[in-house]
Every structure is written in structure tokens, then in C-alpha cells.
Amino acid sequence: MFDCGPAATHKLVKAGLFPTQIDHLFFTHHHFDHDADYPCFLLCRWDQSIGVEQRLKVFGPTLTEKLTEDLIGENGAFAHDWKARINWSTSLEVYQNRGGKLPRRPPVVDATDIEPKWSYEGDGWAVRTALAEHAQPWLDSLAYRISTDNGDIVITGDTQMCDSIVELASGADVLLCMCWDHQSTMNLEKETTGQCGTEHAATMAEKAGVSTLVLVHTGPRLETDSAHEQAAAEMGRIFTGRIVFADELGRLDMSTL
């Protein structure tokens, strides 16, 4: 799972997945629209666990460890919740009825702050990171490349056009790139620092040689069919591959890309 913005846990379940099925969570950065649902996800995953699940591993830029401790640590903002649930008799009965065995343990999460050029291997997949240029020096930001037998996907998070992401995405099958608005509008309104618009997203995709560009984190002026047509025309003059406008709860079949 990558990022955990508003209502992410609810949307995860709507997509047919449950928090207990997620063993790895990666953050691109810590603006609220990328981590506001983190406490909900952590508590839902722990509360529905019965002690047989894999320990959750969380990775992200600076503040990932602090945020986790501040939320569910011994003196965290939600410590009152888990302390009640591991002691209250009814909560313990519910836990046992689900298949858990006493004693019920407090939540334990392996949270790790990571940097650009970090790598990690899972079961059948691998991840490596690169610098994303967004809100530095106030926040650190990362982009991720996920490699599997079915192909490679790059997730930019929030970023402006930068060489580090072009290098990370080189030869990948899919680039999920933030695209806030039409480039001309962003240029006029001076919103290009730390963000990609249509032409900059297309330029990175073309330089990297990816097959498919998926536009995510789009603003309200890119949400209509006519806006999609205009944006696709703008980007088509730069990027020669396939362009996809992401839909909420949408799915991408790697075999068709």
C-alpha cells in the first residue's frame, strides 16, 4: 500500500481488500492528504488482527517513525484506545471469538525512516526509491519503483519534473505521476514549483521511455471529459505512449498495458 490519505481504509475495503491483508505500507511524504487516514488504518488493522498476521512494516521519509510512535506508542494519541481493548473484558471476549488467544498484545509496528536510493525486497517484488522534489526543505519526499514478474510501476508521489524520477522510471512499464492541472494554467498561476502539470508529466514519461502514463492527484480542472481530451492532446505532442486518467477505486491490469 502506498500512502494513506483521507478515507483510504474505507476505500481499501470497498476495493475488496482488508487492512489485515496489508503487510507493507510506504509513504511518499507526510502532507495530510497522503497520511491523514494512517491512524484509522493502524487501529483497524490491529483491532481486526488475531495474532497470526505478519507484523506491519511501514516505510517512508523522515517523520514516519515519529508519526507512528506519536499515534500508537505507549503515550501516543490513541494509546487510550488500545489500552482499553487489551484490558476490557468484552473486548477480550470479542477478540477470542474471532480466533485470538490471550493475552491480547498491544499494537507493534516496524516503522522505518528511509531515504532516496533505498531498496527492499518482498515476496515476488522489490522496491527502490528516488528523490521526489516537492516541499523541501519542510518535508522530505520520495518516489518508488516497484518491480515484479508482471512488470515495473513507478509512483512519483507529489513532485515537480526532475531528473531523479526520470532515472528511477527509465524503462518502466507504468508511471503513476501527479498531474495537478493544465501546464499553461500552472505556469500562469505560478504553481509549478514542487508539482507537475500536463506537459511536465508527459515530458518525464517520454524521457523515461515508459509505456503507460497514469495521471493521478489531478485537480478539479482536470476532472471533466473535455478537460481530459484537451490534456491528452497537449501531452500527446510530447509523450508517445498510452495516457490513462486514473479513477477512484479504478484498477489497472498490467497484462493489458
Image (spheres, helix red, strand yellow):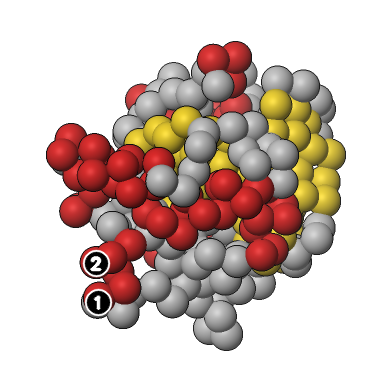
| Alpha-carbon span between mark 2 and mark 1 | 6 Å
User: Disc 1 designates what residue?
Assistant: 189
Q: In this view, does 126 lie above or below 123?
A: below
For the point 64% across and 32% down, which residue is it? 173
For the point 52% across and 34% down, which residue is it? 241
Q: Is residue 139 above or below residue 238?
A: below
Amino acid at circle 2:
Thr
Q: Regarding mark 1 in the picture, which secondary structure is present there?
A: loop
State the quadrant of the C terminus.
top right
Residue extending furthest front? 237
Could you classify mark 1 by the number of other residues whose Cα lies within 10 Å: few (under 14), some (14-19), or many (20 or more)?
Answer: few
Q: Which of 2 and 149 is in front in this view?
A: 149
Q: Which of 50 and 160 is in front in this view?
A: 160
Residue 254 spot, x, y in % from top left: 58, 20
Residue 26 spot, x, y in % from top left: 63, 50
Specify whether 230 is left or right of 198.
Answer: left
Specify whether 65 is left or right of 198.
Answer: right
Residue extending furthest top? 255
Q: Regarding mark 2 in the picture, which secondary structure is present there?
A: helix
User: Disc 2 designates what residue?
Assistant: 185
Q: Which of 100 and 182 is in front in this view?
A: 182
- Regarding residue 172, the answer to whether it shows in the image is yes
Could you classify mark 2 by the number of other residues whose Cα lies within 10 Å: few (under 14), some (14-19), or many (20 or more)?
Answer: some
Residue 63 spot, x, y in % from top left: 61, 71
For the point 75% across and 64% down, which residue is it? 116
Amino acid at circle 1:
Glu
Residue 192 spot, x, y in % from top left: 39, 73
State the quadrant of the N terminus.
top right
- Regarding residue 51, the answer to whether it shows in the image is no
> Do callouts 2 and 1 mark residues in contact (Cβ within 8 Å)?
yes
For the point 72% across and 39% down, which residue is it? 171
Q: Quadrant of residue 162?
A: bottom right
